[in-house]
Image (tube, rainbow, N blue to C red):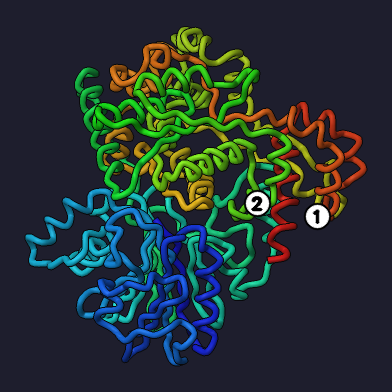
Amino acid sequence: MCGISGILSKRNTEFMKDTVFAMSRAMKHRGPDGEGFAFFSDTACMAAYSDETPSINKESRSFLFNPVTAIHDVADGYSVAFAHRRLSIIDLSESGHQPMCDTSSGYWITFNGEIYNYVELREELRNKGHVFVTQTDTEVVLEAYKEWGCGCLQKFNGMFAFALWDKKSNQVFCARDRAGVKPFYFSNTEQCFAFASEYKAFLKSGLLKFEINETQQFDFIVNGHLETTDQSLFKGIYELKPAHYLVYDLSDHRYQITPYYSLPTTLITDTPESQLVELIEDKLIHAVKLRLRSDVEVGSCLSGGLDSSIIAGIVKYLQPDKSMKLFTAVFPNESFDETNYAKLAAGYVSGSWQTVSPTADEFFRDAEHLNYFQDLPVWSTSTYSQHRVMKLAADHHIKVVLDGQGADELFGGYSHHYMALWKEHLGFNTIERINEAKATIPGAYQLFGKQLLKDVFGLSIDYSGYFDKTHKRFGKSRNDKLNSSLNEQLATDYRGRLKSFLKCEDRCSMAFGIESRVPFADDVDLVDYLFSIPGNKKIQQGVSKYLLREATKTYIPSQIYNRKDKIGFETPVTKWFLPHKKQVIDTINSQLDFVDGTYLASNFDTLIQRKPAFLLRLYSLSIWKKVFINS
């Protein structure tokens, strides 16, 4: 788990070393354990170090097989530069230093993430004649590429984003994992092609000036959407989408982006439920077991909900003699507080339970810090809760945590998943299905009726009154039509909203030098299998995530197994914002010149009660702009 960046120069190589150095330093938080650089031309390779490169790098392959110098002493003339910030998780020795090369120095990689099945892949490659001298998964990626080329991506089970320089083909091969757990952004200008793990690297290095993409800005404010296209909120910076790779040809400076994975659509229809449950249990245990591979201590986030409790329970099953550190955000006296459930789950697995209780004053105190490390404005204060949970883990010296993201998108955990299922099987038994779900979804009939009307008539919300005359055209929200089947809706959510949650997960954890692992979201065997199961098996008798509950009921307390409510990662937005009314209005008016400040002030109390998320997005965008306009 690290931060990666690089520059592929098209014309002028004089700016390379200072720029790539600045890109790397902008992401120091992602890799506090070390820093490394590598420079390439048609005829030479040069490894470089900085004052933050561990001094004892005798085992590093880039130092063993290549000329080495200090970053500021690198001469001009190199056309490619890689940088790497290291967070040491697997093979803590200097042999894990990056950028890493093979023994011929013909292949170099800067890699972020974890290939959880690297042990099995290393053995497979050894049987094919490959020789390994480190214990890292990074070396496995290098050798896998040498063996299978772009096809190596089909072999990887995990989270990753990397760039690999192939001297023989004169290309740079870049790739991102299937779910989008790890980020990869790029820019392409007349001067260079550049990539990085975070947006701020482009700004702080001077590669790009801060400019807002207006279309993306209003899509966020009105619809709550971020990173839904390859364009970003930062003009000139693009996202390599999950499950895609990019090949950049250094001979003509052109690149091509290609998808390498899609969710299964062929369904298993003849497997008995008991066998489905048994196979899901086996795959979940295997997914968690792989994600416990670490040379540092692993902790876990614990909300008290089903998903995180299951992970804690499976870990206890796999490691019965260990007490895992568990971290929870609690909100005493709030209706959505899950303290009692989290305490119950922690006791059930004999975990070492730690809590933090974020407050409104702390949120406003840390708003700039939060938006800076998120790289983008936030659409929910729950991101702040997650941010504080990760800080809590770091304060307890944890560098790896497990988290339950992704279970809802695989098993059917949200209220709109019920509605997609009802829509799929609309008919005589629809009323019966809705009645079964009343305990989980209050006002189920009204919600479903409203959704059907939205799907037919395209109903939207009009926020144009809050904008000046020039920008009123952006004011109407876009209606997202519900898919016609549950599995289609789950696939839409997996590729959409889950990716957004994973982005927040990555930034919250990496802000404190923590690697967050998500067994539900990125285990390819588990994901493929769940999308091969018909939707009507995932929600049964009004019970969400039915198959998940049945597969894991022996690992969790019965009170959590039987929970019908769906709380999620909540925070009291209205209660937090009302006492800070003047601060919120002043901040928005000072940064967003398209907002009608008078209308906002006069409608503030109504807005915070009826549309708090819209107000939060305005405020967060204001903070984000304030932070990055000065970058």
Q: Residue at x 29, y 28 (%)?
A: 316
Q: How many marks?
A: 2
Label located before the other in sequence (2 or 1): 2
Q: Which residue is mark 2?
A: 369
Q: Residue at x 42, y 61 (%)?
A: 33
Q: Amino acid at mark 2?
A: His
The quarter of the displayed image where residue 221 is located = top right
Q: Where residue 540 appears, x then y in whole percent?
A: 38, 15
Label 2 and label 1: CA atoms lie apart by 17 Å
Q: Which residue is mark 1?
A: 591
Q: Is residue 338 above or below residue 369?
A: above
Q: Residues within 10 Å of mark 2 (few under 14, many from 20)?
A: some
Q: Is residue 143 above or below residue 207?
A: above
Q: Which element is circle 2 on? A: helix
Q: Quadrant of the N terminus?
A: bottom left
Q: Residue at x 39, y 20 (%)?
A: 347
**In this image, 391 relative to 90: left or right?**
right
Q: Amino acid at mark 1?
A: Gln
The quarter of the displayed image where residue 125 is located = bottom left
Task: From the image, state whether disc 2 or disc 1 is nearer to you.
Answer: 2
